Image (tube, rainbow, N blue to C red):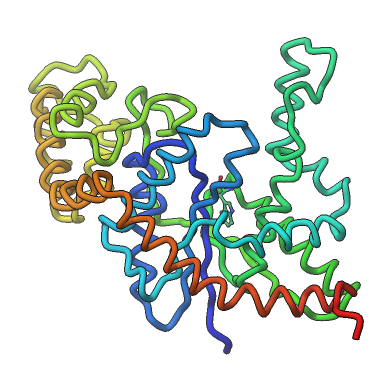
Amino acid sequence: MSQEVYLTGITTTGTPHIGNYVGAIRPGIAASKDLQTQHFYFLADYHSLAKNEDPDKIVCSTLEIAAAWLALGLDAEHAYFYRQSDIPEILELTWILTGMTAKGLMNRAHSYKASVAANEESGNKDPDQGITMALYSYPILMAADILMFKSTKVPVGQDQKQHVEMARDIAQRFNHHYGETFVLPEAVIGENTAVLKGLDGRKMSKSYNNTIPLFADEKRLRKLIMKIKTNSLEPGEPKDTGDSTLFDIYKAFASPDETAEIANRYAEGIAWGEMKQLLFEYINDRIKPAREEYERLIADPAIVEEQLRKGAVRAREIAVPYLQQIRDAIGIRPLG
Ligand code: TRP
């Protein structure tokens, strides 16, 4: 069997939070320790243009996300760790794939349809109001990310599954038209990766503004944990672990034994205030060493820049010759 190639991108909008950590960063770093498989992790900075983000925010997010992965121990010698915009071949491939993408396929993208639905709901006369071509064509750029490195497995959240299927459709159509060129990718939806709830009990997400930044300083971390929503049960009253954001977060960090111990404390009626303090101390102890490294990297972005550039050089060793082959297949080639 040929070697599996894992690839996933992180859009550079926002500061890494503990939901990103348990849902993507931690499993990604753990998986990359498997030397039998290849791993590509990249910062999808061109994807952030779909929503016309503030340039300063994009650059800040790029640094923070890259520093987080490195501080948490990504082996950037084995895994390919790069910034999308450092690989111009990806954008070239995007246009090539655009020629093989049915417009109807893009019409069906959930993210585009959600934006249209939002316009219609707000009574807007133009259903495409505020929708850029970058948002509309977003799945094609994502297909190029995936196909450029012959990825076989693409770990993503449920919301991105359709995009991976679109990449597969586009690749199939290309192969049919021009001959076998692309490897067909498959989405991997993490079943045992936790989806964390945020401060208000909804899914932790930047768009809900309910996140706990992974590397918040001690004071802020404590303050945020104290804000996590609980019910009004008094100390001494038994509490349900099945409906507790505090418990879920604890569980996402702790071992099964430690989790069982806390479940006992719930049954005994631990006070919410005590549980919050305990959770704060637990997370803080575990994050501390990585946080120190993270702060060092944020203070010295040149170190991060250097890593990303090295990653891009390695990634382009694959992308450049492959793109030549693709161009050749479509009839963009030297004349003699
Ligand atoms: N669109 C993805 C997200 O928002 C990020 C992404 C960009 C990605 N390119 C990718 C994920 C390629 C997997 C593979 O989460």
- Residue closer to the observer: 265 or 49: 49
- Residue pictured at 40% horizontal, 49% vertical: 23
The residue located at (79%, 12%) in the rendering is 124
Q: Where in the figure is residue 309, as x and y percent of width and height? A: 44, 63
Q: Residue furthest front?
A: 336
> Residue 18: image x %, image y %?
32, 41
Q: Position of residue 98 (x, y in %)?
A: 82, 55
How many circles with numbers are drawn on the protein? 0
| Quadrant of res 239 | top left
Query: Which residue: 49% across, 28% down?
Result: 207
The residue at 11%/23% (across/down) is 273
Q: Give how far across and how far down residue 8 sits, in percent.
A: 52, 59
Near-viewer residue (223 or 260): 223
Q: Quadrant of residue 20?
A: top left
Q: Is residue 137 left or right of residue 213?
A: right
From the viewer's perspective, tell me whether residue 33 is left or right of residue 8: left
Question: In the rendered view, does 119 fall on the left or right side of 293?
Answer: right
Residue 281, quarter of the rendered image: top left
Relative height, residue 189 to residue 14 (above, below) = below
* Residue that extends furthest to the bottom in the rendered view of this protein: 1
Query: Above or below — where is 264 with respect to 56?
Result: below
Q: Quadrant of the C terminus?
A: bottom right
Quadrant assignment for the N terminus: bottom right
Above or below, 49 relative to 209:
below
